[in-house]
Amino acid sequence: MAKNWKKSALVAAGLLALSGPLANAQTVANTADAGHVLADQFCADCHIVAPHGRPGWTDAPAFDAIANRPDTTEAKLSAFIQIPHAHMLNTGRPKNESEGIATYILSLRKN
């Protein structure tokens, strides 16, 4: 009985060790998708988050317009999203969320 428990524990430990890199690869692959979900949750009241999406309550720029500005970079966007915006609730997202939102915004860039 103890031998089976040890074998099961070793198999479980091996699977956990292998799941880390796979989970990270999946997170990286879905960063723009995760950023889109976050943008819908935190940004859509003011910004048009998706092209042809519902308009926000303000004249805040649409995300595709932000993406297509010549000086827009992921680093600048992420840093800006981490700072609370004036007159807006739920702003000042943590770094992991701001990076996802920035990645999503840049995925809207027209080449």
Image (cartoon, rainbow, N blue to C red):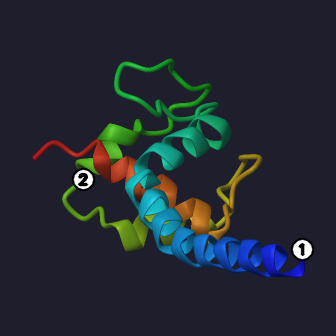
Residue nearer the viewer, 86 or 47:
47
Residue nearer the viewer, 7 or 14:
7
Residues marked 2 and 1 touching at CB (< 8 Å): no
| Residue appearing at x 51%, y 21% in the figure | 55
Left or right, 64 with respect to 78, comes to left
| Residue appearing at x 72%, y 48% in the figure | 87
* Above or below, 18 relative to 81: below
Could you say which quadrant of the image residue 110 lies in? top left
Left or right, 7 with respect to 58, comes to right
Q: Earlier in the sequence, mark 2 or mark 1?
A: 1
The quarter in which the N terminus is drawn is bottom right
Could you say which quadrant of the image residue 9 lies in? bottom right
Q: Pointer 1: what residue?
A: 1
Could you say which quadrant of the image residue 12 lies in? bottom right
Residue 51 image offset from top left, x and y in percent: 35, 26
Q: Pointer 2: what residue?
A: 69
| Residue appearing at x 45%, y 43% in the figure | 33
Identify the amino acid type marked 1. Met
Residue 47 image offset from top left, x and y in percent: 52, 35
Provide the secondary structure element on which disc 1 rests. Answer: loop
